[in-house]
Amino acid sequence: MKEFEDYEEEIYKCSRCGLCQSVCPVFKATLNECAVSRGKFNILNGIIKGDLTFSNNVKKYLDLCTGCNACKEFCPSGIDARNIFVAAKHEYYKNTKQPLLQKFLNSYILFKILLICAGATGKIMRLSGISFLLECFEKILPQLGYVGKRLYLFNSLIFKRFNNKNTCSSDVNGKKAVYFEGCFNKYINNDTESAVQYVLKNAGIDFIKKNFECCGISYLNDGNIEKFEALIKKNLKAVGDCECDYILTDCASCNYVLKEYKNYNDTNTASEFSAKVTDALDLIKDIKFEINSDKKYNIAVHKPCHDNYDFIEIVKNINGINFIEVQDFDKCCGFSGKFALQNQQISRKISAQKAQHYIDNNVDFIITTCPACLLGLNQGLAEVEAKHKPVAINLFVFLAKYCKQYYINN
């Protein structure tokens, strides 16, 4: 891992041209110069020169970033802003004393407690029928103000759209996949996990479950590298000596972070782990999908910021759909985990602008591959008033529920 001082030359490379303003979702929502990369580089230059020091205020400005890294793609100098900000926040954690409350709020124990509580609440709501009732009245909920919008968002997270208990294949062809289920599947709603195994039921893959912890993306983005490295060690230990062909993920963010393990843990185990990380999408290339009804759905996609896999072609090739390319489909949804908690109003504004594009195009389904993006999309849909709202859904859940499949080689 590169330290903050290793980026000094790259920070100086910024010409302050301001082109990053045109692609930064946070700047567009706030018009705050400190929200854009150019403004943050001015602050970091001040630290390098000794005119400023890392402080809580500096950290707040660095946190005005979703980590989408759109600025890197648009930067004439190709500056990797996301990694620079992570290194800068890591320097903050090393050199700034944290208040006790902030340490508690950043603790992994609290994070797990919140996940467990959210999962337990969701299970109670599903068993009692409250979740189904909220789904029936989803058009009314956003009209009830902030509380109604939060209920809409939470129910979108826990509501089960697909549930298939007998999903593992008994016809194993020798391929073994250690399945990295991720926090959402493990604690809150295993819809996607069920769908992944259902779609891959004829692929002859032996799914192996291990007791993994969180992938650590929130700590990595926050620059809290010590906690991130601790999670890496726990997840590497969870795999143990298990021989497998894949470390299989269904989440774009998890997939991105797990491949980063080798850069933060200098061991052969970490390198081998990262090398085996495989997106579940890679295993459905030889499957042909077709809508299982006569209805022709209007389908659009949202491409997660961390998604390096072109799943859009898979969606386009589903027989019987009407694919719609919506404006800014590949732009940040505005959620980005901790960013949405720290900057609720900004996050909701970005999400609402995003959701409006899909509503304007009369889309039935918005397909994506990241659970956090599903939250961002639903957050936006809750903010926008409309007679018809699309359903934000994971790709595998859509394929399992609405499609029939055929292996091309059959």
Image (cartoon, helix red, strand yellow):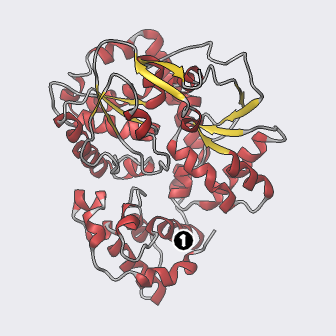
Between 11 and 116, the one lying in front of the other is: 11
- Taking the image as shown, residue 276 lies to the left or right of residue 121, namely right
* Residue 279 image position (x, y, % from top left): 58, 40
* Residue 86 image position (x, y, % from top left): 51, 65
Between 36 and 402, the one lying in front of the other is: 402
Residue at image point 63% right, 20% down: 202
- Judge whether 291 appears above or below 366 on screen: above
Residue at image point 67% right, 49% down: 231
Q: Is residue 210 visible?
A: no
Q: Residue furthest front?
A: 409
Q: Is residue 29 visible?
A: yes
Residue at image point 79% right, 52% down: 269
The count of marks equals 1
Which type of secondary structure does the marked residue at label 1 adopt?
loop
* Residue 197 image position (x, y, % from top left): 60, 23
Q: Quadrant of residue 359?
A: top left
Residue at image point 51% right, 44% down: 252
- Quadrant the N terminus occupies: bottom right
Q: Quadrant of residue 326?
A: top left
Q: Which residue is mark 1?
A: 96
Between 274 and 100, the one lying in front of the other is: 274
Q: Quadrant of residue 294?
A: top left
Q: Residue furthest top?
A: 128
How busy is the neighbourhood of tag 1: few (under 14 within 10 Å), some, or many (20 plus)?
A: few
Between 230 and 107, the one lying in front of the other is: 230
- Quadrant the C terminus occupies: top right
* Amino acid type, callout 1: Thr
* Residue 264 image position (x, y, % from top left): 67, 61
